[in-house]
Image: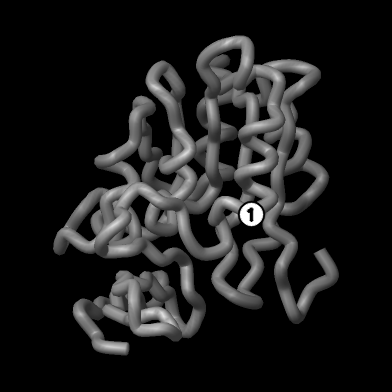
Amino acid sequence: KHVLYRERNFYGAVAVYEQWDKDMINLAYEFMHGRVTHGIQLVTNRKLPASYYGEKSGARLALITNPQRNAGSMRVGAIGLGIGTLAAYSRPGDVYRFYELNPSVIRLAQGQGGYFSYLSDARALIEVAAGDARLSLESEAARHQFQNFDVLFVDAFNGDSIPVHLLTREAMALYLSHLGGPDSVIVVNVTNFAIDL
């Protein structure tokens, strides 16, 4: 790996690495928060979703099997932005709303340095709500601005650092209030070594 960018703020250290795959065929940019990878984007095939949101992921399955996808445009929410890989699945007319606490993550995902382009390449309308996701969703609910998400992803974890306020019964009730209907789903990344999610 070759370090291209590093920054530290109140929320921790972020870095962008340039790396080749194991066969030395594809060059990619890797985004890391601390020691945890939060997204990879190929340099040559920029629109291909990679890493744990790749084409064989549960995230893709939740999006392409949702009945709303065949009915028309979708509203997709994501608690945790990473590099915006989910936006690679967007279509014209869709709205993808990302909630992100760390301003460094937002800047990099929006194209600072030219490393990541999932958001700018997206075919959907992209919205980024800066700040704590639960507080943002609570504020929206208090204003009766329910998001009517078809799919809501909860993936604001940094390795084994779990913001448990995003996983309480109260948080789940809040997420349910922002869903669009009976076919809507909440998708939670449960990969973790410390807590049995």
Between 181 and 24, the one nearer to me in the picture = 24
The residue at the far top in this view is 71
Taking the spot 77% from the left edge, 21% from the top edge, the residue there is 183
Between 83 and 194, the one nearer to me in the picture = 83
Between 148 and 86, the one nearer to me in the picture = 86
Secondary structure of the residue carrying tag 1 is loop
The residue at the far bottom in this view is 1
Taking the spot 55% from the left edge, 55% from the top edge, the residue there is 53
Say if 140 sits above or below 189 in the image. above
- Is 100 on the left or on the right of 27, as rendered? right
Residue denoted by label 1: 56
Residue 106 appears anywhere in the view: yes
Q: Position of residue 160 (x, y in %)?
A: 65, 77
Taking the spot 74% from the left edge, 80% from the top edge, the residue there is 193
Name the quadrant containing residue 138.
top right
Q: Position of residue 70 (x, y in %)?
A: 62, 16
Q: Quadrant of the N terminus?
A: bottom left
